[in-house]
Image: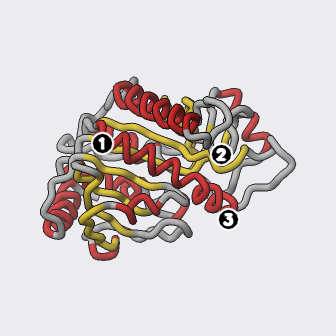
Amino acid sequence: MTHENALEAAEYIRSKYDGEPKIAVVLGSGLGSFADELENSVAVPYEEIPHFVRSTVEGHAGRLVLGEVGDKTVVVQQGRFHYYEGYTMEQVMFPVRTFGRMGIETVLLTNAAGSLNADMRPGSLMLISDHINMMGRNPLRGQNDERFGPRFPDMTTVYDRTLQRLIDATAGDIAAERFEQGIDSKLTDFLYRGVYCALSGPTYETPAEIRLYRLLGADAVGMSTVPEAVAARHQGMRVAGISCITNFGSGMTGDGIHHDDVMEMGSRVSSLFKQLLTRVIARI
């Protein structure tokens, strides 16, 4: 996908919406309902956008939604493209590269992930502090176009530390309010911090692989996010990532892992997730 392709897609999206969003949100499995609550929104199916491919996974609606969250204008990717669907890394990264040509400055990446931390139970959220790319390929491999970014981009701080502090503080406020309202029996922090390990999929991991990733320092595993994070940083955007913990890693319990269960847990956590995301966007 070339720079000209991204410009063409950006121009088409701009023609469908009068606002000028500076924040983009990419929604993971089971988290798509956030896009349905945008105010004054316009939805653009992926098949209408030049050079966009289609999302083929259950729980990914396959459209771009532009609208308002309070006084902020945002563009929301309701369903993403995955490497395991057979798409190239260039196709997976393309929406984020298009966001860059639209003038987006901040990208909030979300996903459904499996926990490798016994204390980080399904139903909690994890703020991504760093990642490990185990997908078998660097998304920037191949010819580099300097109009996107440098040949050798620095990845020391992929996930913006100021955004991490903002998200941490917002989650703390929500936790205190839930305690005061009697929703939680004790004041607990539902947002953990951790390292996200990205794998190619589509199989879930074996117990032996989970043990390996834990030794490497991973706190959660999933099949997305890293290509978009790398593409965003390559273009100089600020990046934050939040994982919805939907299950424990294989072998950590006696249960198997099923996509339906992942979707169900995403739906159960959606209210808390949407509250956090809405407040974070208002504070950016």
**Within 10 angstroms of label 1, few (less than 14), some, or many (20 or more) residues?**
few
N-term-proximal mark, 3 vs 2? 2
Marks 1 and 2, how far apart at CA = 28 Å
Q: Tell whether 239 sits left or right of 248.
A: left
Single out the mark in the foreground, 1 or 2: 1
Residue 129: percent from the left, percent from the top? 49, 29
User: Which residue in the protein does label 3 denote?
Assistant: 260
In the rendered image of this protein, does residue 164 appear above or below residue 67? above
User: Which residue in the protein does label 2 denote?
Assistant: 114
Q: Secondary structure at mark 2?
A: strand
Looking at the picture, tell me which residue is in the foreground, 170 or 93.
Answer: 170
**Within 10 angstroms of label 2, few (less than 14), some, or many (20 or more) residues?**
many
Amino acid bearing label 2: Gly
The quadrant the C terminus occupies is top left
Contact (Cβ within 8 Å) of mark 1 with mark 2: no
Residue 147: percent from the left, percent from the top? 17, 44
- Which residue is pictured at 40% across the width and 41% down the height? 229
In the rendered image of this protein, does residue 173 appear above or below residue 141? above
Residue 75: percent from the left, percent from the top? 28, 56
Q: Is residue 180 visible?
A: yes
User: Which residue in the protein does label 1 denote?
Assistant: 282
